[in-house]
Image: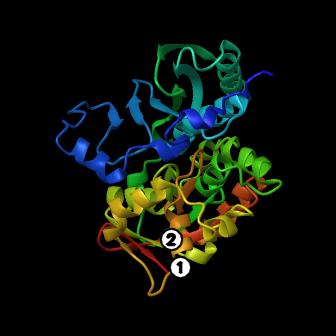
Amino acid sequence: MDAAPIRLSTLAHGGGCGCKLDPGVLRGLLADQPMAGPFERLLVGNETSDDAAVWALDDGTCVIATTDFFTPMVDDPHDFGRIAATNAISDIYAMGGKPIMALAILGMPVGKISPETVAAILKGGASLCAEAGIPVAGGHSIDTPEPIYGLAVIGTCRRDEVRRNADARAGDALILTKPLGVGVYSAAIRREALPDGGYAEFIATTTRLNRIGADLAHDSDVHALTDVTGFGLLGHGLELARGAGVTVVIEAEAAPLLPHAEALARAGFVTGASRRNWAAYGESVTLPADFSEWRRHLLTDPQTSGGLLVSCAPERAAAILSTIQAAGFAQAAIVGHVEPGPAAARVI
């Protein structure tokens, strides 16, 4: 009898954006690193934990550059490739740009994974790039202890359409374009406990391109964008708050959730990354008294290929939300607002 195939997710210590470095550790590592330097055309560097770097060319066009890769959170290699590619391309959309080209980043444990499995991962990523209208023009591969896949992505936009996370304004409304719960779904997948229909929900959200970001950048009332990934809604909301020097207020019950997210979180399907996230930045977050632990876990839940957090003029929020929903993000919702004050987050 043939041996059972190796589950891809079991070859990694953590999957998807849940394998990102603890945000507190990352801040410490970057604290003593030199800033990108006094380059006049470098519009966005590493100063504000933004989603990608932005360089201005002579004609007013900007080049956007990013890279993102991680270990598998699903066992289907084609799906893993699709999710990783969607996640990497999202950084371009989160800056208000459109992707033009990608390079593959591949690390595979030689001898543990078949060439057919690796080919399926690459084909999955290429299929999503094709959906985004871009080629995978090359890449680099190495032998690694765990499977790793992702992309380096190049995009463009006009200079006046760059959307930094540091440009949120006091008074802005906050819109989240995708539901939360990817991390708890991932935890259930690893334990083979995801309810019927849950996997299809998981794939639908993690492979939905955030191309709406490029459209929103045409609207001057959209002031800031960032995508919600490994640090959760609270963590990436805090990055926006710190970049802009404001307080982000999140309405916990307004945050959209995947259908099984609440039940899974209540049942303890929580990632280690969710706990690490809270330990890293919880001191900068004010919670209501007796706030439910399961709901807190969903606000810190690592979102692999999550939605965009949109900071926009409050008087246009309803119209902008309708535009986002009409573009296929049916669960998009207004989840809070921005206030003047210290760089912090408050949950209500």
Residue behind mark 1: 292
Q: Is residue 48 left or right of residue 126?
A: left
- Viewer can see residue 190: yes
Q: Is residue 41 above or below residue 305?
A: above
Q: Amino acid at mark 1?
A: Ser
Q: Residues within 10 Å of mark 1 (few under 14, many from 20)?
A: few
Horizontal and vertical percent position of residue 254? 62, 74
At 47% from the left and 47% from the top, the residue drawn is 163
Quadrant in which residue 332 is drawn: bottom right
Q: Is residue 321 left or right of residue 223?
A: right
Horizontal and vertical percent position of residue 115? 66, 13
Residue at the limit of the structure toward the bottom, as seen here: 289
At 45% from the left and 84% from the top, the residue drawn is 288
Secondary element under disc 1, as helix, strand or loop, is loop
Q: Is residue 304 left or right of residue 188?
A: left
Residue behind mark 2: 296
Q: Amino acid at mark 2?
A: Arg
Along the line of sight, the residue nearer the viewer: 39 or 207: 207
**Cβ atoms at labels 2 and 1 below 8 Å apart:** yes
Secondary element under disc 2, as helix, strand or loop, is helix
